[in-house]
Image (cartoon, rainbow, N blue to C red):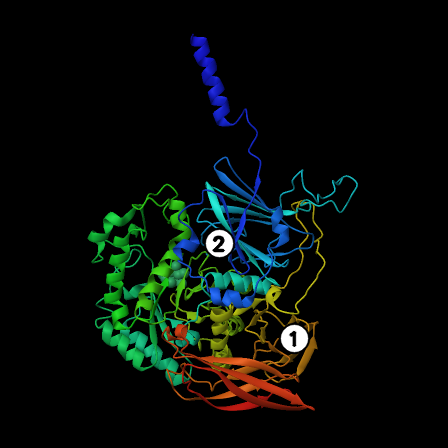
C-alpha cells in the first residue's frame, strides 16, 4: 500500500513540476484594431496595474483618424507568445537591415538592435543595461511599426540577440579556427521579450515611417504635452539653503545683468525637513512664503519646488498618512501608497494649501527612480496590495499624473521635473533629468527621448572650464527645459567671465525663438510630433557607416564586437532647425545633413545637401542649420516670456530659396482653454516668383487674440 502511495506521489510531483511535459508551444497573438493604425493584443491574463492605466490615457481619436488608416504591419503576424514558467514570453520577427529605436531613455546609443535591455526604473549610472529613469517598453523600427508592452513588471528585451534553432533566416555557422570574420554575436531575426507575469497587453502602432509611428504612439497616449509658455523660458535652480532674500537677490542679478529668467527652482532647503520631507516651508528661511511667491510673480518669475515623496514624521499629515504607507522607508521617511485614495487626498490637501494656493507653479519630483540601496526593496509591501516591483515601475509616473491633475482642476498649466517615468507619459508636463553628467551621453538621451514620448533636459550644473560651461549652456538652450541647476555650488550663467557674453547670447537666442518653440510644442500636442527629433525620425536622413573594428591587444576581451558608428549627437528641434552641439575640446565637428538644401542659421548661407559637412568650432555659436524654405518666427530678446495678450513684434525669418509654408501657434500660455479651440493658428507663406521671395500670412484659427503683432519678414539667404 505504502508503495502505491509513494508512486502516486511521484507521478503527481513529476507532472506538476513540468518534467514529464514539454513546454507549451507558443501561440499567435490575436490583434484587434482599437484606433486607426493602432492594434491591441492580449496574452494570458494581464495585470490590472499597467503604465497606461496609471497615466489614464485618453487617446486623441480625432487626430489619429486624420493620420489615416494603415494595414496591420504584416511582419508582426509572425509574432508569437506563450505564458510559461511564471513568465510571459513574446517574440516578434525582425528583417535583415531593420533597425530598432526606443526601449527607454538610453544614454549610450540610438540604435538598439543587438542589445539586451532590462527595462527597470533606476537611476542611470553609466551601465548600458537598460536600467534607466524612463524604461519605456516601446520600440519603433524603420519598417513602419512600433510595439508597446504595457507592463509594470521588470521586463527583459532581447532586441535582436537570441538565435533560435527553428529560425526562418538563420545565421550561418562559422569556424573561428579558419574564419577571421567569425562574429561573437551571430545574426538574430527576432526581438524576444520576457515579462515576469501571468500575461500582458501589447500594442502595435503603424506608420508610413518611424515619425508617423511615434506620432500614433503619442496621440494614442493623449497627445504630447503643451507646457505653459513661461516653462519654455530660462530656469535657474538656486543653492539648496538659500533664504527668500538670497533668492530675491539672485533674481535681481539676473534681471539687472540682462539674463533671461522665467522660473526659479528651490531645492530641499525650502522645507523645514528634507530627506525625508515635511512639504512645509522652513519658517526661518521663508517666513512669508505667500508674499515671497507673489513678489516673484510680479517680476514675471514662477516658483518650482523640489520634493521627493518620502514623508517625515514632522510633516503635519504624518500621523494620518502612516496607515497608507509601505512596509519600508526611504531615508527613514515613509513611502505613501498612492493607490490608496487616502494617501492621494492627504497629499492633495497639504500641497494645495502649502503650494498651489499661494501660486507655486510646479514641482521637481526627485528620487522616484531610486538607487537600489536606498529605495524600497522588492520584498516591500504596500497597503493597496500593489507589489514592490510594480510600485517602483510606476511611482514616478503616478506622481506626475496626480500633481498634473491638481493643476488641471485649477485650469492652470504646470511644468516640472521628474526622475522617473513610464509609458503613457506623453501628455504629462514633466522633464526628466539626472545627476549623471556626461555631456555627450546627455545629448544621446535627448535624441532617445524623442522615440518614447518623454522630455529630457541636459541640465547645466557646473564645469571644469569656461569652454565646457559654454558648451553645456549652449546645448541646454536647445532642449525642452533650458535649466541651470545650481543647487550644489551656486554656479551662475556669468560665473565664467571668458564666455559670459556667449552664454548670455545663447540664453537670449532661446528667448528669441520662443514663438517657434511654442509652435513646435503645439505640434506635439496636435499631431504627436515630438519637439526634439532624433535623426532617424527626420525626413531625408540617411547614414550608413561601416562597423569599426578596433585592433585588439591580447590583454583585451577577445569577444569585443565591432562598433557601428551612428549619429547620436545632433537632432532636430521642430520642423526646421537642426542642432549640432559642440563639446569641450572640439575644434570642429561633423554634421550629417539630410537630403535637401541646408542653410546656416546665423548667416543664411548655403552649407550643403544630403552630405556630411565639417563645421569649425567657434566659441560664439552652437552650430544650427535650417532646411530650405524653413520659416522661424522670432521675437525680440526679452528677459521673460510675454504674458497673456502682451504685444510683441515678430520677425519671420525665411531660409533658402524654396517657397514654403509654416504655422505659428499661440494661446494664453497658462490655461487649458486651447483644448476647446481657444488658440490662434496663423499660416505663414513664402512664395518664390522668378527669384523674388514674398511673404504673407493668413489666419487659420482665431480662437485666441494673439499678442504677436507687426510681423516683418527677413529673407536670410541673399
Ligand atoms: C538630487 C538631484 C539634484 C538636486 C539634489 C538636491 O537627487 O538630482 O538635482 O535636486 O538632489 O539634494
Q: At 24% from the left edge and 66% from the top edge, which residue is drawn? A: 354
Asked whether 87 or 370 is in front, the reply is 87
To which quarter of the image does residue 566 belong?
A: bottom right
Q: CA distance from mark 2 to mark 1?
A: 34 Å
The correct choice, above or below, for 41 with respect to 55 in the image is above
Q: Nearer the viewer, residue 556 or 258?
A: 258
The residue nearer to you, when weighing 86 against 121, is: 86
What residue lies at 42% left-to-right and 45% top-to-bottom?
A: 47
Asked if residue 35 can be seen in this view, the reply is yes
Question: Residue 347, image x and y in percent?
Answer: 27, 59
- Estimate the x, y position of residue 310 in percent, counting from the top left: 31, 54
In which quadrant of this rendering is ligand 1 seen?
bottom left
Dots 2, 1 in contact, CB < 8 A: no
Q: x, y (%) of residue 617?
A: 62, 75
**Residue at image x 62%, y 52%?**
113
Pointer 2: what residue? 135
Q: Secondary structure at mark 1?
A: strand
Amino acid at each position: 500500500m505504502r508503495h502505491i502511495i509513494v508512486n502516486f506521489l511521484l507521478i503527481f510531483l513529476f507532472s506538476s513540476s513540468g518534467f514529464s511535459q514539454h513546454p507549451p508551444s507558443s501561440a499567435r497573438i490575436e490583434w484587434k484594431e482599437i484606433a486607426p493604425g493602432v492594434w491591441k493584443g492580449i496574452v494570458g491574463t494581464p495585470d490590472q496595474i499597467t503604465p497606461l492605466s496609471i497615466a489614464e490615457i485618453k487617446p486623441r481619436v480625432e487626430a489619429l483618424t486624420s493620420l489615416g488608416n494603415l494595414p496591420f504591419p504584416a511582419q508582426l503576424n509572425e509574432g508569437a507568445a506563450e505564458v510559461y514558467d511564471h513568465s510571459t514570453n513574446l517574440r516578434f520577427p525582425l528583417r535583415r537591415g531593420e533597425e530598432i529605436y526606443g526601449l527607454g531613455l538610453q544614454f549610450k546609443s540610438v540604435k538598439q538592435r543587438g542589445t539586451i535591455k532590462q527595462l527597470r526604473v533606476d537611476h542611470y549610472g553609466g551601465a548600458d543595461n537598460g536600467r534607466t529613469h524612463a524604461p519605456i517598453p516601446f520600440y519603433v523600427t524603420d519598417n513602419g511599426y512600433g510595439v508597446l508592452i504595457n507592463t509594470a513588471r521588470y521586463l527583459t528585451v532581447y532586441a535582436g540577440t537570441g538565435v533560435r534553432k527553428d529560425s526562418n533566416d538563420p545565421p550561418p555557422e562559422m569556424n573561428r579556427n579558419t574564419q577571421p570574420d567569425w562574429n561573437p554575436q551571430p545574426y538574430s531575426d527576432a526581438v524576444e521579450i520576457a515579462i515576469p507575469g501571468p500575461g500582458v497587453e501589447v500594442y502595435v502602432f503603424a506608420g508610413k515611417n518611424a515619425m508617423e509611428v511615434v506620432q500614433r504612439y503619442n496621440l494614442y497616449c493623449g497627445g504630447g504635452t503643451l507646457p505653459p509658455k513661461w516653462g519654455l523660458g530660462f530656469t535657474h535652480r538656486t543653492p539648496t539653503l538659500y533664504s527668500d532674500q538670497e533668492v530675491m537677490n539672485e533674481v535681481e542679478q539676473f534681471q539687472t545683468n540682462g539674463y533671461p529668467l522665467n522660473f526659479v527652482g528651490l531645492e530641499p532647503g525650502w522645507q523645514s525637513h528634507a530627506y525625508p520631507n515635511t512639504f512645509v516651508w522652513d519658517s526661518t528661511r521663508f517666513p512669508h512664503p505667500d508674499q515671497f511667491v507673489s513678489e516673484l510673480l510680479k517680476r514675471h518669475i514662477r516658483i518650482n519646488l523640489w520634493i521627493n515623496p518620502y514623508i517625515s514624521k514632522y510633516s503635519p499629515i504624518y500621523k494620518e498618512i502612516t496607515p497608507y504607507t509601505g512596509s519600508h522607508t526611504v531615508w527613514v521617511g515613509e513611502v505613501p501608497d498612492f493607490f490608496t485614495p487616502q494617501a492621494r487626498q492627504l497629499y492633495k490637501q497639504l500641497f494645495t494649501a502649502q503650494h498651489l494656493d499661494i501660486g507655486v507653479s510646479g514641482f521637481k519630483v526627485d528620487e522616484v527612480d531610486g538607487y537600489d540601496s536606498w529605495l524600497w526593496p522588492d520584498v516591500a509591501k504596500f497597503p493597496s496590495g500593489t507589489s514592490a516591483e510594480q510600485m517602483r515601475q510606476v511611482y514616478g509616473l503616478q506622481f506626475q499624473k496626480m500633481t498634473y491633475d491638481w493643476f488641471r482642476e485649477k485650469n492652470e498649466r504646470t511644468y516640472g521635473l521628474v526622475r522617473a517615468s513610464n509609458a503613457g507619459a506623453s501628455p504629462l508636463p514633466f522633464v526628466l533629468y539626472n545627476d549623471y553628467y556626461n555631456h555627450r551621453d546627455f545629448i544621446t538621451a535627448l535624441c532617445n527621448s524623442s522615440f518614447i514620448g518623454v522630455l529630457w533636459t541636459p541640465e547645466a550644473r557646473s564645469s571644469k572650464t569656461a569652454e565646457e560651461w559654454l558648451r553645456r549652456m549652449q546645448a541646454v538652450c536647445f532642449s525642452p527645459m533650458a535649466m541651470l541647476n545650481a543647487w550644489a555650488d551656486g554656479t551662475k550663467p556669468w560665473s565664467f567671465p571668458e564666455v559670459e557674453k556667449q552664454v548670455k547670447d545663447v540664453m537670449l537666442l532661446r528667448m528669441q525663438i520662443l514663438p517657434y518653440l511654442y509652435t513646435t510644442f503645439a505640434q506635439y500636442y496636435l499631431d504627436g510630433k515630438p519637439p526634439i527629433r532624433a535623426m532617424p525620425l527626420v525626413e531625408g536622413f540617411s547614414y550608413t557607416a561601416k562597423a569599426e573594428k578596433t585592433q585588439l591587444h591580447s590583454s583585451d576581451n577577445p569577444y569585443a564586437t565591432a562598433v557601428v558608428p551612428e549619429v547620436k549627437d545632433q537632432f532636430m528641434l521642430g520642423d526646421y532647425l537642426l542642432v549640432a552641439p559642440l563639446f569641450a575640446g572640439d575644434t570642429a565637428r561633423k554634421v550629417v545633413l539630410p537630403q535637401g538644401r541646408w542653410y546656416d542659421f546665423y548667416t543664411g548661407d548655403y552649407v550643403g545637401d544630403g552630405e556630411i559637412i565639417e563645421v569649425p568650432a567657434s566659441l560664439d555659436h552652437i552650430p544650427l542649420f535650417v532646411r530650405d524654405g524653413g520659416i522661424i518666427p522670432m521675437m525680440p530678446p526679452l528677459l521673460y516670456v510675454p504674458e497673456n495678450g502682451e504685444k510683441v513684434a515678430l520677425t519671420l525669418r525665411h531660409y533658402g530659396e524654396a517657397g514654403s509654408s509654416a504655422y505659428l501657434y499661440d494661446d494664453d500660455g497658462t490655461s487649458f482653454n486651447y483644448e476647446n479651440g481657444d488658440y490662434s493658428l496663423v499660416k505663414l507663406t513664402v512664395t518664390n516668383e522668378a527669384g523674388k521671395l514674398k511673404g504673407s500670412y493668413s489666419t487659420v484659427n482665431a480662437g485666441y487674440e494673439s499678442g504677436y503683432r507687426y510681423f516683418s519678414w527677413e529673407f536670410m539667404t541673399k
